Amino acid sequence: MAAPGPRTTPEIAIVGAGMSGVLLGIRLREAGIESFTIYEKGEEIGGTWRDNTYPGLACDIPSRFYSYSFAPNPEWTRLYSPGPEIQDYLLKITDRYGMREHIRFGIEIADVRFDEQRERWQITTTSGERTDADLVVCATGLLHHPRYPQIEGLETFAGACFHSARWDHEVPLDGRRIGIIGTGSTGVQLTSDLAYRAGRLDLFARTPQWVFPAPNPEYPRPLRALLQRFAGLNRPGYWFWGRFMKYGIGRAVVEEGPQRRLADRMCRWNLSRVKDPELRAKLTPQDQPMCKRMIVSPRYYDAVQQPCVDVITERIERVEPQGVRTADGVLHELDVLVLATGFDAHAYIKPIELTGPGGRTLDEAWADGVRAYRTVGVAGFPNLFFMLGPHSPVGNQSLIRVAEDQASYIVQWARRIRDGEVLRAAPTQEATDAYNDAMRAQMPQTAWLSGCQSWYLGKDGFPELWPWRPERHEEMLAEPDLSEFDVVAPGR
Ligand code: NAP
């Protein structure tokens, strides 16, 4: 039986209206493709920047570079902008590019299944609504399933207790006894803020992390006014910080060399600013800098040296109504307990059920570990793409830049479908295996295997990050390599 004819108006379903889903919509519209819908389970765009509203939230990538390349923001107030500014920026871009008319809010996708008869994906929402798509893009993000710690008695705590990504703004903080569990980027940013507001702050630091000392100066108003007036003046900032990240930390995390040595020294120097040797010992990581995500903070070590702050490395035994009891028998009495315990970064599109041709599910395809093709595709799953999916995070780089590479790549496939060159295409198993083998061969060069535990490592023990220089991501996704795809043309 001949394959169906060309899909000149391909239906494209984008799951998630975060930074990457909205970006793809903008790029599709630029390519003259308007037949796309962005499904968003929340009531607003923004993903992680919508969900995270904790005090001290900021982005650890310079904002001039943590921007869409085509939409500089003259209004950034600081080198590293606070979270609410980033969400405001994303809201403005969504409106400026008319994306709201393409977004369906409050719609949660439950099931995505390839219908072999009709050669299309069938999508079912949690309310039972069904729709078809010629191309499906999972732009569901990496860090959106809060990870709650398994600590005995947590539910018995009598004060306020919440995850950092589910901040309860009704709870007063000033002058109160606050506990924070976790010393990742979130715990560090929270501590840097709350140390100056809490009556007492207990930081439960199971594993200390290295902290890179980057200053966070404010952009003076006259400069912001100038950038506002002359749009072209925004370009050098994007260019400069892009190169700074690419040739600096972008090299340091994936290869030996002067950048890694310098970053290492700067972290160690930063730590040496902690005067009390006992506190310094508590804050000294056992692994190498950059083994976990490099934390960037100009204020953390000042914050932990505030008199009201106690860094507790003793193991947490249990939580009781009055507070946290540690293994040494001490009860740390608290009014508020914040769980800065991270996210399940390996959930990917879960709980969505995804079933490809032949009834093969994504869970089955990834039963032995996540295997993607060039961060965007999965062998045997046609017309299905990921944004910020497996191996997408490029160590301490702007995820916006990463998403832009992926969006341009996906748009090229969408164009091919629209132009009748392709009905469906899926990466071959051989190409996927070759790519994964190359990636794993590169992993030992990275800093992520130097003996630490973090969400960076998958269940197969390999990091979930991009192990090469950042520019290779751009090169690898510059153009689809058709020889690495099983392509079916319309009507064949
Ligand atoms: P995280 O890096 O996964 O850190 C979780 C912390 O919670 C760790 O210190 C962990 O200790 C601790 N923890 C977990 N369970 C625990 C338990 N049962 N008892 C005691 N401690 C426990 O999470 P995150 O800080 O939320 O950051 C997640 C990611 O979000 C980051 O890697 C980063 O990519 C992103 N982020 C970025 C920014 C930014 O500025 N761009 C800001 C915030 C977050 P162990 O290390 O011992 O497991």
Image (cartoon, helix red, strand yellow):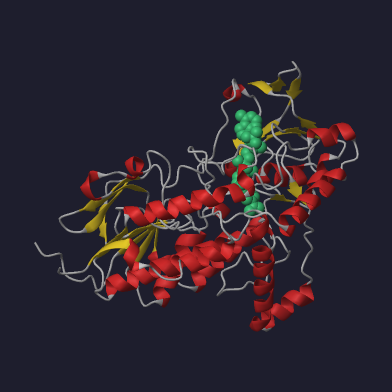
Q: Ligand 1, what quadrant?
A: top right
Residue 16, image x, y percentages: 43, 55
The residue under the point 44% across, 46% down is 348
Position of the C terminus by quadrant: bottom left
Q: Nearer the viewer, residue 220 or 384?
A: 384
In this rendering, position of residue 414 left or right of residue 26:
left
Residue 106 visible within the image = no
In this rendering, position of residue 436 left or right of residue 356:
right
Residue 271, image x, y percentages: 82, 44
Q: Nearer the viewer, residue 361 or 32?
A: 361
Q: Is residue 377 above or below residue 308?
A: below
Residue 439, image x, y percentages: 49, 52
The residue under the point 65% across, 44% down is 291
Farthest residue to the right: give it.
Answer: 275
In this rendering, position of residue 33 left or right of residue 146:
left
In this rendering, position of residue 116 left or right of residue 272:
left
Q: Nearer the viewer, residue 280 or 469?
A: 469
The quarter holding residue 159 reads: top right
The residue under the point 63% across, 71% down is 73
Q: Is residue 258 above or below residue 413?
A: above
Residue 67, image x, y percentages: 60, 67
Position of the N terminus by quadrant: bottom left
